[in-house]
Image: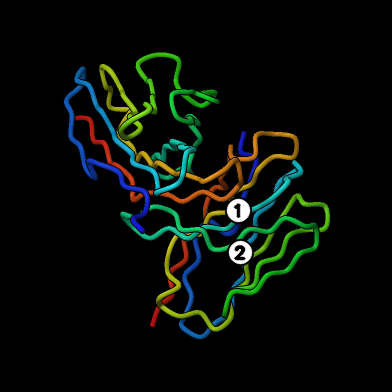
Amino acid sequence: TQLLEQSPQFLSIQEGENLTVYCNSSSVFSSLQWYRQEPGEGPVLLVTVVTGGEVKKLKRLTFQFGDARKDSSLHITAAQPGDTGLYLCAGSLLGGATNKLIFGTGTLLAVQP
Amino acid sequence: NAGVMQNPRHLVRRRGQEARLRCSPMKGHSHVYWYRQLPEEGLKFMVYLQKENIIDESGMPKERFSAEFPKEGPSILRIQQVVRGDSAAYFCASSPIHSGELFFGEGSRLTVL
């Protein structure tokens, strides 16, 4: 059973395009994080969202936490080849151990120059 | 400020041998987590440790796998009598307190021949 489903699984776009990655669940999370992982490396934390409806911006990346804290989205504006990588959402279940992160299935993004 | 250090980065073992993976958390971090990433799958929680204590090992296989985080020295994930299905990337993460933000190492990639 996969608690966090990400879509799409794979995405190949041209430089300059916009894209949105989704992270969905039927469970409620106390917090949700987005990581980016490059080949041969460990995941690197991009952002943490805690409040339902919260929106955070990190340069060209916009993260949103759903009002019910069951889902999240990552929007990238004007994608660049440097954005290529595996994007992972991860959540801490409400009422669960805070650090026992549940990771999503991942979205592999390739930005072509 | 060095990040989470894992070694070895790559390890090759034959079936039936033992694998030992080491993790030194970031300075000032007393919480260590181990995750496993199988090909085509997301990160799966294995175990959460503090110094000299296993806090949550609900993700650890019941046999052949063990973990420790001694008072002195790195955390060690030990896999006895490895099988081909143990081939994966094993990631260690640390956090300074019981929070939801983890800092990952670059991983140890185990290949079982």
Image x and y of residue A50, in percent: 72, 55
Q: Which residue is mark 1?
A: A6
What is the distance, in whole Å, between disc 2 and disc 1 at their CAs? 7 Å
Residue drawn at point x = 83 percent, y = 58 percent: A67
- Quarter of the figure with the C terminus of chain A: bottom left
For the residue marked with disc 1, what is the amino acid?
Gln
Horizontally, residue A41 falls left or right of residue B56, namely left
| Residue in view at x 73 percent, y 60 percent | A65
Please provide percent x and percent y for residue A40. Answer: 31, 54
> For residue A21, which numbered disc appears in the image?
2
The answer to whether residue B1 is above or below residue B50 is: below
Disc 2 and disc 1 in contact, CB within 8 angstroms: yes
Disc 2 residue type (three-letter): Val
B53 vs B34: above or below: above
Q: Nearer the viewer, residue B16 or A32?
A: A32
Residue B68 in percent (x, y) is at: 38, 24
Q: Earlier in the sequence, mark 2 or mark 1?
A: 1
Between residue B21 and residue A8, name the one nearer to us.
Answer: B21
